[in-house]
Image (spheres, coloured by chain):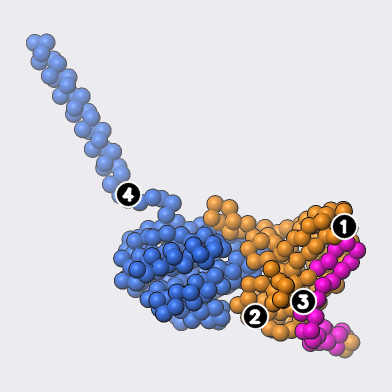
C-alpha cells in the first residue's frame, strides 16, 4: 500500500518534470540557438534590396562567396567615408583575392540614398563595392537580420543624420557569420580577418 | 553684389600654394586644415585640422563660419556599443600646451549646405572662433575623396 503510493507519487513527479521540459521545448521551438547579438547566417536571412545599378538582390545571390557587409549612408561626412576608405585600402591589400569577395554597403538612409545616389558615391572608392538600398521596411528587415540598429537624428534646419551600427560584418562562403571588424580597426587586424574568410 | 561674386570666386580660386601653411592668433596656431572633394552640394562636406595651444591658458574652438557652407557645425563621431553617432559639439576644448586634432573618426567640422562643389586642388577660407584667442581666418585645402590625412610632409 505504502509502496504503491511512493511509486505513484514518483511517477507523478516524473510526469510533471516531463511536462515542464516538454512545455519549455515547445515554447522555444522557433527560437534559434543563435546568439541574439550577432548577425544571422546569410542562409537564414530574408531581405530583398536594390543594388546601385537597379537590380534586386537577396542573400541567395551571395551563396558560395565570402562576404563583407556594412551599414552606412552617403550623407555622412565622417564615419562612412572613413569606413569606405578603410575598405578600399583592405581590398587593395588583399590583391586579386578581393575579387572573390562580395563587398556591400547597405544604406540606413533609403530616403536620400536612391540607387543612383549610391552609384555615384561607391564608384569613388572601389568598383567592387556594391551599394544596396530599398524601402524603409526592406531596410529594417535587412538591419534586423544583421542585428543592426539605426535611428534618424535631427541635425537642425530639417536636416538629419543617422546613428547606426558601425562595424563591418564578415561571412564565410557557406553563409556562416565569421567576425566583425570594428570601426576604424587597424588594417593589421582587419586584413587577416578577411584572409580567413577567403581561405 | 558683383563685388561679392568676384570676391567669392577669387576666394575659391585661391592658389593651393599655402597647402600646409600655419595660421596663428595669440597662443593658438592651426595647421593641416583640409577637406574632401564633394560630389555635388547636397551631401555635407567635412573639415579636419590641427590646433595647438602654445599658451598657459585653456582655450576652446567654439564656432565656424565660411562662405563655402551655409551651416557649418562642429561634431564629434562617437562609437558607443558599436553604434556610431555624430553629436553636435558646442565647442572643442584646446587645453593649454596641447595639440587637438580634428581627424577622421573623431571631432570634425560638418559643412552643411555647401554653396559650391568642393573640388580637389582648390582651397576655401574658414573663420574659426576661439573662446580666448578670438577669430582666426584659415585656408582649407580640398583634397581627394580618397585621402585620410593632410598632404603635408610633416603631417602626422
Q: Which quadrant of the figure has residue A76?
A: bottom right
Rendered view: B75 above or below A15: below
Q: Residue at x 52, y 60 (%)?
A: A182
Q: x%, y% of residue A199? A: 35, 68
Dot placed on the residue nearer the N-terminal end, 2 or 1: 1
Report which residue position mark 1 lands on.
B55
Mark 2 or mark 1, whichever is nearer to me: 1
Rendered view: B74 above or below A31: below
**Distance of mark 3 from mark 2, alpha carbons?**
16 Å
Same chain letter for marks 2 and 4: no
Q: Residues within 10 Å of mark 4 (few under 14, many from 20)?
A: few
Mark 4 or mark 1, whichever is nearer to me: 1
Dot placed on the residue nearer the N-terminal end, 3 or 2: 3
Dot placed on the residue nearer the N-terminal end, 3 or 1: 3
Report which residue position mark 3 lands on.
B20
Whether residue B135 is in magenta: the answer is: no
Q: Secondary structure at mark 1?
A: loop
Q: Residues within 10 Å of mark 1 (few under 14, many from 20)?
A: some
**Distance of mark 3 from mark 4, alpha carbons?**
56 Å
**Distance of mark 4 from mark 1, alpha carbons?**
59 Å
Which region shows up in magenta? B4-30
Q: Secondary structure at mark 2?
A: loop
Report which residue position mark 4 lands on.
A33
Q: Secondary structure at mark 3?
A: loop
Q: x%, y% of residue A32? A: 32, 50
What is the chain letter for disc 2? Answer: B
Rendered view: A158 above or below A10: below
Amino acid at each position: 500500500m505504502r509502496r504503491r503510493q511512493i511509486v505513484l507519487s514518483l511517477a507523478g513527479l516524473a510526469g510533471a518534470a516531463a511536462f515542464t521540459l516538454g512545455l519549455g521545448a515547445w515554447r522555444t521551438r522557433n527560437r534559434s540557438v543563435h546568439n541574439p547579438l550577432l548577425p544571422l547566417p546569410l542562409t537564414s536571412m530574408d531581405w530583398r534590396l536594390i543594388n546601385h545599378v537597379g537590380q534586386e538582390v537577396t542573400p541567395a545571390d551571395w551563396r558560395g562567396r565570402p562576404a563583407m557587409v556594412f551599414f552606412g549612408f552617403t550623407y555622412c561626412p565622417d564615419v562612412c567615408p572613413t569606413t569606405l576608405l578603410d575598405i578600399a585600402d583592405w581590398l587593395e591589400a588583399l590583391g586579386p583575392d578581393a575579387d572573390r569577395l562580395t563587398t556591400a554597403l547597405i544604406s540606413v538612409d533609403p530616403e536620400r540614398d536612391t540607387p543612383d545616389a549610391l552609384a555615384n558615391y561607391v564608384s569613388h572608392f572601389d568598383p567592387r563595392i556594391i551599394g544596396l538600398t530599398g524601402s524603409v521596411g526592406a531596410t529594417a528587415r535587412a538591419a534586423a537580420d544583421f542585428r543592426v540598429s539605426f535611428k534618424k537624428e535631427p541635425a537642425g534646419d530639417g536636416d538629419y543624420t543617422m546613428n547606426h551600427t558601425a562595424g563591418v560584418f564578415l561571412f564565410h562562403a557557406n553563409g556562416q557569420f565569421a567576425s566583425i571588424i570594428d570601426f576604424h580597426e587597424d588594417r593589421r587586424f582587419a586584413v587577416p580577418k578577411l584572409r580567413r574568410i577567403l581561405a | 553684389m558683383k563685388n561679392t561674386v568676384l570676391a567669392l570666386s577669387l576666394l575659391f580660386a585661391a592658389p593651393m600654394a599655402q597647402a600646409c601653411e600655419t595660421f596663428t592668433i595669440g597662443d593658438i596656431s592651426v595647421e593641416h586644415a583640409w577637406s574632401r572633394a564633394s560630389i555635388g552640394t547636397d551631401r555635407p562636406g567635412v573639415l579636419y585640422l590641427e590646433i595647438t595651444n602654445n599658451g598657459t591658458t585653456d582655450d576652446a574652438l567654439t564656432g565656424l563660419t565660411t562662405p563655402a557652407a551655409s551651416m557649418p557645425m562642429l561634431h564629434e563621431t562617437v562609437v558607443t556599443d558599436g553604434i556610431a553617432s555624430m553629436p553636435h559639439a558646442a565647442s572643442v576644448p584646446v587645453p593649454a600646451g596641447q595639440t587637438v586634432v580634428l581627424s577622421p573618426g573623431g571631432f570634425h567640422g560638418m559643412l552643411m549646405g555647401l554653396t559650391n562643389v568642393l573640388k580637389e586642388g582648390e582651397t576655401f577660407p574658414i573663420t574659426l572662433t576661439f573662446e580666448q584667442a578670438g577669430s582666426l581666418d584659415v585656408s582649407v585645402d580640398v583634397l581627394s575623396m580618397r585621402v585620410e590625412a593632410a598632404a603635408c610632409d610633416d603631417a602626422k
